[in-house]
Amino acid sequence: MSILITAATEMELDPFLKRYPTADYLITGVGAPMAMYSLLHKVVQVEYSFILQVGIAGTFSTSLNIGEAVLVQQDCFADIGVMENNAFKSAFDLGFHNRDQFPFQDGWLINEGAIISHSSLKKVKGLTVNLLTDDKNYINKINTKYDAALESMEGAAFHYVCLQNNISFLQIRGISNKVGERDKSKWKIKEAIAASNDTLIDIYESLQSK
């Protein structure tokens, strides 16, 4: 099986690379545009059977623990749209896109692969933004609209490229902080990276044995 591992930064992949230094991996850079271009450029050159994305993320949820790893089952581009009359309207709400046009399902990019379906790990909804903020009013609006558990800057781009190219995929996130908390002393980056990489290693080894 041809497997690609991808992350926004090398830091987020460091424990895995120490164990598997010769694995095929891609550091895309931070943000949806860089992630989408880098990954698409890679997959048109090499035919992969499976792609794993790993990284840290903030959480909106009170039921998830800082430092734990989860799988993202569905993701969306949460900040493409218009903020007007103190409300956010997505490109789908505005009629610019059909919310059920492939690869979207009701505006979401959903992983329906066998691995995530059969995994015992927590499976959550994520949203992808290009701006991280501590503006509680904006955070509440986004959280209310999408009711997602996690916030990242690359997840939806990853899902989009894999779905468009019919490649099996899995997004693994370690929870490093609460969304809106910009005081890094309250983050658990090391723990989030360790948990997400432990999960990555387990899944990578399982895929290699097939």
Image (spheres, helix red, strand yellow):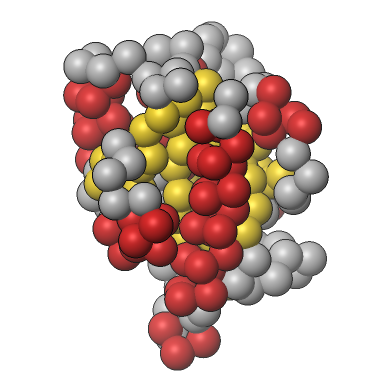
Q: Is 209 left, or right, of 15 in this rendering?
A: right
Whether residue 28 is visible, yes or no, is yes
Where is residue 183 shown, x and y percent of the image? Answer: 43, 85
Q: Is 38 left, or right, of 32 in this rendering?
A: left
Residue situated in front as seen by the camera: 51 or 79: 51
Residue situated in front as seen by the camera: 194 or 148: 194
Q: Is 148 left, or right, of 84 in this rendering?
A: right
Q: Please give the name of the residue rendered at 69% of the width and 46% of the height, measured from the top-left corner.
A: 124
Give the answer, above or below, for where 106 lies relative to 87: above
- Counting the numbered discs, the total is 0
Where is residue 117 shown, x and y percent of the image? Answer: 75, 30
Where is residue 186 shown, x and y percent of the image? Answer: 51, 86
Q: Please give the name of the residue rendered at 69% of the width and 23% of the height, measured from the top-left corner.
A: 114
Q: Quadrant of the C terminus?
A: top right
Residue situated in front as seen by the camera: 169 or 207: 207
Residue situated in front as seen by the camera: 163 or 12: 12
Q: Please give the name of the residue rendered at 64% of the width and 66% of the height, measured from the top-left corner.
A: 68
Check the image and name the residue furthest to the bottom: 185
Residue 10 quadrant:
bottom left
Whether residue 86 is visible, yes or no, is no
Residue 136 quadrant:
bottom right
Q: Please give the name of the residue rendered at 60% of the width and 37% of the height, measured from the top-left corner.
A: 206
Check the image and name the residue furthest to the front: 209
Where is residue 54 shown, x and y percent of the image? Answer: 45, 49
